[in-house]
Image: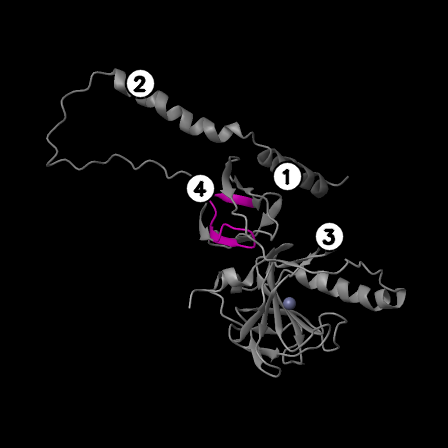
Amino acid sequence: MNRARLALIVAGTLLSACVAAPQGSEGAVPAAAPAAAGALASVPSPPPPPSVSRPTPAPAPAEPARFVFSGELTQGGWIRGEVPRGTLSARLDDTEIAIGPDGHFFAGFNRDAEPAAVLSATLADGRTVTEQLTIAPRDWRLERVNADFTAGVPSESFMKRRRPELEAIAAARTAEAEAEGWQQNFIWPARGRISGRFGSQRIYRGGKEGSYHSGLDIAGGGGTPFVAPADGVVVLAAQEPFTLEGHLIIVDHGHGLNSAFLHASEIDVREGDRVRQGQVLGKIGASGRATGPHLHWSLMWRGARLDPLLILGED
Ligand SMILES: [Zn+2]
């Protein structure tokens, strides 16, 4: 084993030692404060000096290391904010959070997120900071259909075509492009009637649940241009239509956040293009499996499906 490799292993051990810092270590610091206060209180204090002429050089107590954030603490929602000062790495439950050079971060909550989640940060001094989150459940729209659930087994010829499409989508969804769109206030990619909401689900005869709707459908009219809701990098642009998604575009907004746009009639961007918020990506269509022209917009953060309506600013 060479020296460099040994050094790496030692560094790795140190890092895991930091990560494994006991939960109690966080409490040890504040615990010292009451004891000190008690010691001070036991000393008879002289009468306070007149306060007019003396500057008070008492140092401000160090700010507690904590997460600061705002957003939508609900299923399909998100938060954006700053990690505690001195953070080396941070997680939402088991998912790694990307940290910007200024300590800013984004995290999202899946459609079926559990009611309790934990933000945690490992600090450079080895401490761990945790923050308990309460994720509000949503009252998802359920559509009861008087039909049997048919989980048709796809034919081998279909899967032969489908497999590389799924692989391309998975690769695009996990791409890590350098983009800053995750920090922006998102805008509507197109205007039109909302013809399908995120999270709605069909319930079949006998109570069998179908898969839920993974995005927001906007019936903007065939041929209407749609735009990037935030800055990003085009990580997939299907010039040849995919079987289900048709002409599909995926834009990486950075820090694990990305948008997919389905069923386009025309694509105006190429893979690798850097796009700005408001830039035209393509035209609304009905390519792939669609009953009529509409834009299906789905939003994901590190495998969690988010509700696009929750990230759109008020307007
Ligand atoms: Zn849809």
Q: Position of residue 127 (x, y in %)?
A: 51, 35
Q: Dot 2 surroundings within 10 Å: few (below 14), some, or many (20 or more)?
A: few
Foreground tag (3 vs 1) = 3
C-alpha gap between disc 3 and disc 2: 66 Å
Locate residue 110, reporting x and y percent. 60, 52
Q: Which residue is mark 4?
A: 66
Q: Are marks 3 and 1 in contact (CB under 8 Å)?
A: no
Q: Amino acid at mark 1?
A: Ala
Earlier-in-chain disc, 3 versus 2: 2
Amino acid type for the residue under numbered disc 3: Lys
Q: Quadrant of the N terminus?
A: top right
The Cα–Cα distance between marks 4 and 3, rounded to whole angstroms, is 43 Å
Residue 208 is labelled as 3
Whether the residue under disc 2 has CB within 8 Å of ligand 1: no
The residue nearer to you, when weighing 113 against 15, is 113
Closer to the camera: disc 4 or disc 2? 4
Q: Nearer the viewer, mark 4 or mark 3?
A: 3
| The C terminus sits in image quarter | bottom left
User: In x, y percent, where is residue 302?
Assistant: 63, 54
| Mark 2 secondary-structure assignment | helix
Question: How did the renderer colour the structure?
Answer: one colour
Compared to residue 75, the image places residue 33 above or below, namely: above
Identify which amino acid the numbered label 2 is placed on. Answer: Ala
Disc 4 residue type?
Arg
Label 4: which secondary element: loop
Label 3: how many Cα within 10 Å (few below 14, some 14–19, many 20+)? few
Q: Which mark is residue 122?
A: none
What's drawn in magenta, residue-wise? Answer: 72-90
Q: Residue at x 14, y 35 (%)?
A: 54
Magenta stretch: includes residue 205 = no
Q: CA distance from mark 1 to mark 4?
A: 26 Å
Give me the C-alpha separation between circle 2 and circle 1: 41 Å
